[in-house]
Image (tube, grey):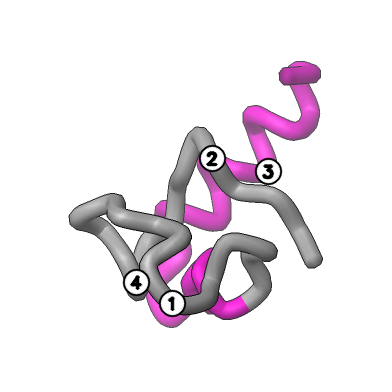
Amino acid sequence: MSFLKRIWAFLRSVIPGGRPLCDTCKYDYGNACRRPERPNATRCPDYRQR
């Protein structure tokens, strides 16, 4: 992950009221994602944008 992407991910996780990643993840259907943070994850190693 590039340096700027890491900074951006950190800032998104710190700022309250941010949109959860799960809303825009391509694995957000049925039982495709079994992470315990779901559906309100702000960081996820499996995240892929739709």
SS assignment at label 3? helix
SS assignment at label 4? loop
Which badge, 3 or 4, is on the more N-terminal residue? 3
Marks 3 and 2 in Cβ contact (< 8 Å):
no
Image x and y of residue 17, in percent: 43, 81
Q: CA distance from mark 3 to mark 2?
A: 17 Å
Q: Nearer the viewer, mark 3 or mark 4?
A: 4
Residue sitting at x 75%, y 33%: 5
Category of crowding for the residue at label 4, using alpha-carbon neighbours closer than 10 angstroms: few (below 14), some (14–19), many (at least 20): few
Which badge, 3 or 2, is on the more N-terminal residue? 3
Q: CA distance from mark 1 to mark 3?
A: 29 Å
**Magenta segment:** 1-23
Q: Nearer the viewer, mark 2 or mark 4?
A: 2
Residue denoted by label 1 = 30
**Mark 2 belongs to which amino acid?**
Asp
Image x and y of residue 48, in percent: 70, 50
Residue denoted by label 4 = 40
Image check: 23 left or right of 3? left
Q: Nearer the viewer, mark 4 or mark 1?
A: 1
Residue sitting at x 60%, y 43%: 9
Q: Nearer the viewer, mark 1 or mark 2?
A: 1
For residue 8, which numbered disc appears in the image?
3
